[in-house]
Image (tube, rainbow, N blue to C red):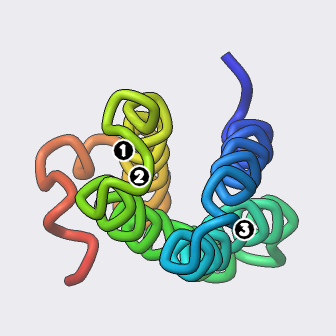
Amino acid sequence: MPDIAERTVAYLLRLIALYRALESEGAGRILGRQLLRPGTSIGANVHEAQGGQSRPDLIAKMSIAYKEAGESAYWLRLITEAKLITRAALRELVDETEQLTKILSSILLSSKYGKKESRVNGPSTLNS
């Protein structure tokens, strides 16, 4: 399985393909552009976190990546509900967005609280 940095690159390449499919229609072009912004930010922040100078730096960058993954999920939902692309065509991309969100959450919890506590407290402790 590729590491998180490589997965975010593959994810962005898929978002670019989606944007190209959306760009011929006005609303699709706008929503596609909105999706590209957080989608590119996920990978950029993961890459920065890996070169971070400290644990707080890693946590800060991974937190941004986590938030951007949530925003990406929002834009994918709008694209789906607006019927700009079929739900079936977006299924794998939506699934990868959910998986990236879970991976980033796990990284954050492990980085903030250690592995034992992150399993006990779950994702709800991210905002505490």
Instruction: Determine the CA span between mark 2 and mark 1.
Output: 5 Å
What residue sits right under mark 1 in the picture? 98
Q: Which numbered circle lies on residue 7?
A: none
7 up-or-down from 32: above or below: above
What residue sits right under mark 2 in the picture? 101
Badge 2 density bin: few <14, some 14–19, many ≥20, Cα 10 Å: many
**Residue 100 visible in the displayed image:** yes
Q: Secondary structure at mark 1?
A: helix
Instruction: Determine the CA span between mark 3 and mark 1.
Output: 16 Å
The x, y position of residue 58, in whole percent, is 66, 71
The x, y position of residue 30, in whole percent, is 57, 82
Asked whether disc 2 touches disc 1, contact meaning CB atoms under 8 Å apart, the reply is yes
**Left-right relation of 45 to 73:** right
Amino acid carrying label 3: it is Thr
4 up-or-down from 128: above or below: above
Q: Secondary structure at mark 3?
A: helix
In this view, the residue farthest toward the top is: 1
65 up-or-down from 27: above or below: above
